[in-house]
Image (tube, coloured by chain):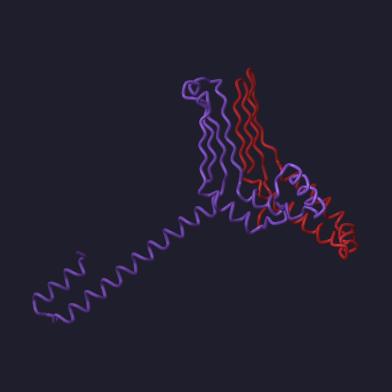
Amino acid sequence: MSDNKKKILDMLAKGKISADEAYRLLNTIDTKESGREETRRDSSASRESDGKLKGKYLHVTITPSEERQASEHAERVNVRVPMSLMRAGIKFTSLIPPEALDKANKAMEEKGINFDVRNIKPEDLESLIEALGDTEIDIEGSHGEKVKVFVE
Amino acid sequence: MNWPPMWAYVKIKGKHHGFRFWIPLFLGFLIMLAFFIAFLPLTLLIILILWPTGWGRWMVMAIKTGYVMLCSIRGMKVDVQGRHETIYVSIV
């Protein structure tokens, strides 16, 4: 029970305020507290969603197996790519001339893929990049090496 | 406004030796900027001539996108450790 509520109940017990006034005051406190709770939840949710939407870097890491990790000669790869570079790369695809897109469609059709590259819109690719924020890929190889792809 | 990366840090370590150095990318950009300013009137003329065909707009978009891509490289890190060699590149 909050301090304010205790004070109200004390005042009611001492007869300083009536039951109606105590009821109104307690309701006001409850409304204020629930409003503050919602604001806190909303701001943390937007922070979380902002963090997911605006993941800054795409990480690709390859770590050796536990047995080889102790070795000085273990092979490791750690690549960090800014997400803004991926977005800029997507904008670059809009510069591809229509004739090149036709050739790409034709080549895919010959391989049995009936997909029109022109149907891919920048908004769709932006949604794909945002979804990458939730994506985590973990692969363990046959020799114990681990491949991880994630956005941070 | 986004700025292009200013420095690149490169560290190469072999079996018996290694070295590390900073590359001042901003110097290269200054030279590129000088060339850009020098060729700006010609570029604008070409864009104006090609504008009715649609290629002029394409040139403007290509220049803008190229600059945005260049600015986006900042923050990139590549760290590869092989059996006997290590290569580390960081763009800041």
Q: Extreme left residue here? A: A14
Residue nearest the viewer, comparing B43 with B53: B53
Residue nearest the viewer, comparing A128 with A80: A128
Q: Picture coordinates of residue A31 (x, y %)? A: 29, 73
* Residue plotted at (26% across, 71% down): A30
Q: State which quarter of the image contains the N terminus of chain B.
A: bottom right
Q: Extreme top residue here? A: B16
Q: Colour of chain A?
A: purple
Q: State which quarter of the image contains the C terminus of chain B.
A: top right
* Residue plotted at (67% across, 58% down): A121
Left/right of residue A99 with respect to residue A136 in the rendered view: right
Classify B87 as above or below B43: above
Left/right of residue A118 with respect to residue A34 in the rendered view: right
Q: Picture coordinates of residue A128 (x, y %)? A: 59, 52
Classify B7 as above or below A146: below
Q: Picture coordinates of residue A85 (x, y %)? A: 65, 48
Q: Colour of chain B?
A: red
